[in-house]
Amino acid sequence: MAVTCQLCSQRDASTHLTELAADGTRQELHVCPACITRLELRLDQDPPAIAVLLAATTAAEAIAATPKGRKADLTCSACGLTWAAYLQHNLLGCPTCYAAFAPQLDPLIRRYHSADRHRGRRAGHDAPAPDRRAELEANLAEAVRAERFEEAARCRDALRHLDGGDP
Amino acid sequence: MTPVADLIERPAGWFGAPADRGAVVVSSRVRLARNCVGWAFHRTLPKARQQELVDRLLATAARVTGWEAPLVWRLSDLVESERTLLVERQLISRDLAAAKRPAAIFARSDERAALMLNEEDHLRLQVLAPGLDLQACMRDAAALDERLGTALGWACDARLGHLTACHTNVGTGLRASVMLHLPALTETGEIKVLLRGLARLELTVRGRHGEGSEPAGHNYQVSNCRSLGVDEDTIVQGVTTAAGRLVTAEAIARDVLMSKQAYQTQDRVHRAYGLLTHARSLSSDELNDQLSWVRLGAALGLLPGLDTATLDRLALRCQSAHLRLAHPEAEDAAERDRVRAGLVRVGLS
């Protein structure tokens, strides 16, 4: 029977880590391919401790916690996508990725479009959505609950912006 | 929820190209890629949140589009043949049809406008029209975009414009495309030179179903490559101008065929007509190839009583998923080929 990934609790796990502590206790962790990619885990070379993986709430934390001082890959702090993972599928994780990966992404954008600045419409941009506040408030609550504090701060700033204050 | 199979007997509103100028342009399409502010793209968004997003988009679409009796389907409720039928009717992309994530389609009842929800981007908005009319498509798409953007709030950047899951769509998020039937240019070989010219104009050519599909039945889809650094009107004008040139070139090539190779051209057209009106088994590929010549013959007036709009509807009706859903008793490909041949004989009689 398939075991569910313990990191995302959504997909079937394909990799099963077993860790034996010095006192003989045994701990297992089941991980799906998507989480392995998302967190840029090199399980054959330098797997992080299971406790670290389970405690890590963002990719940045997981990678920073990776032993042997492996340099953390460039990571979007909002969604956890790494630059290496982006390159695999050419799909970004969230709008913030554009800022997070700007040094790498901007040259690709310039090469593809022969331009680096938008010249068209910005639909609905000048009129704050009537239900935008509710959405931002919901996102803020969710971000706080999940302890995604940077995202929470962005939602808070956006709400202030809607009220006419400084973002 | 309207059963997908109910579409089979309906004429898609964007089909039935005007017969003027040889019905070279089959249809026009404008697509806008949009994402909601405050939400991650599907790649990193947990499934539960994707479901929440789709629910929210469906509710907003129902509220702001004002479409009467829209066609609404959640992809998870559809079997493979139903999804493929929606691809054949240009209502969803091949990628969305294959997706296992929460996704939905919200379309106008005449199928001339549709919203793909949780495709590569949160929302892909498309407007289609028969013949060459990208300006009207863009006008309708912009109005719809404005209403949806006001209600949902698009992810936008001051420098980069609309932010999309793939950097190739950033900026306007616009793809303007025109479907053309170019049998004479293909036959004379001139199409290769013209396609190289289009590449220099930063336009791209694909098959009927977009990225990754081969031109079948001499059908080519011409669209813009760049979405950043150029405004919507310029993109639409560029594709319209290129399509207009291809229409003119195709007309000249047809004149050449009818003046220098009249006998051979008439022979090809009538052979194709004879095959289609008498065959007892027709594969999809053979139908596409032969119907293209019959369509050319109808446009040139070689087959009195046949019009291109009827042929286009017949071609759609004979696509694989349309056949599978309309004739579930035809269980394998060989049986469907026999059913297809029967439909074509009736359609052309």
Image (spheres, helix red, strand yellow):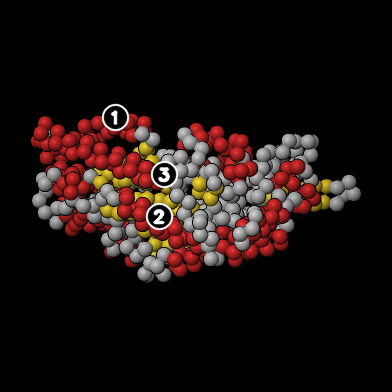
Q: Please report the residue visible at 59 percent of the width from the left and 49 percent of the height from the top.
A: A94
Contact (Cβ within 8 Å) of mark 1 with mark 2 = no
Query: In terms of depth relative to the viewer, which is nearer, B137 or A57?
Result: B137
Which secondary structure lies at badge 2? helix
Give residue B193's mark: 1
Whole-angstrom CA distance, mark 1 to mark 2, is 34 Å
Gap between marks 1 and 3 measured at Cα: 28 Å
Residue placed at 44% from the left, 61% from the top? B147
Q: What kind of element bears circle 3?
A: loop
Please tell me whether mark 1 sits on a helix, a strand or a loop: helix
Could you confirm whether marks 1 and 3 are on the same chain? yes
**Residue B81, how many percent across, how many down?**
40, 58
Q: Which mark is residue B304?
A: none
Q: Is residue A78 left or right of residue B237?
A: right
Q: Amino acid at mark 3?
A: Asp
Q: Is residue A143 above or below residue B20?
A: below
Q: Nearer the viewer, mark 1 or mark 3?
A: 3
- Decide: few, some or many residues near mark 2? Use Cα within 10 Å; few <14, some 14-19, many ≥20: some
**Mark 3 or 2 closer to N-term?**
2
Q: Which residue position is annotated with label 3? A: B231
1 or 2: tag closer to the N-terminus: 2
Q: Earlier in the sequence, mark 1 or mark 3?
A: 1
Residue drawn 11% across and 54% down? B305
x and y percent of residue B212 in the render?
A: 41, 42
Q: Quadrant of the N terminus of chain A?
A: bottom right
Name the amino acid type tagged 2: Ala
Residue at image mark 2: B142
Instruction: Determine the image quadrant of residue B73.
Output: bottom left
Q: x%, y% of residue A82?
A: 64, 42
Which chain's residue wears label 1?
B
Q: Label 1 amino acid?
A: Val
Residue A87 coordinates in the image, percent (x, y): 57, 38
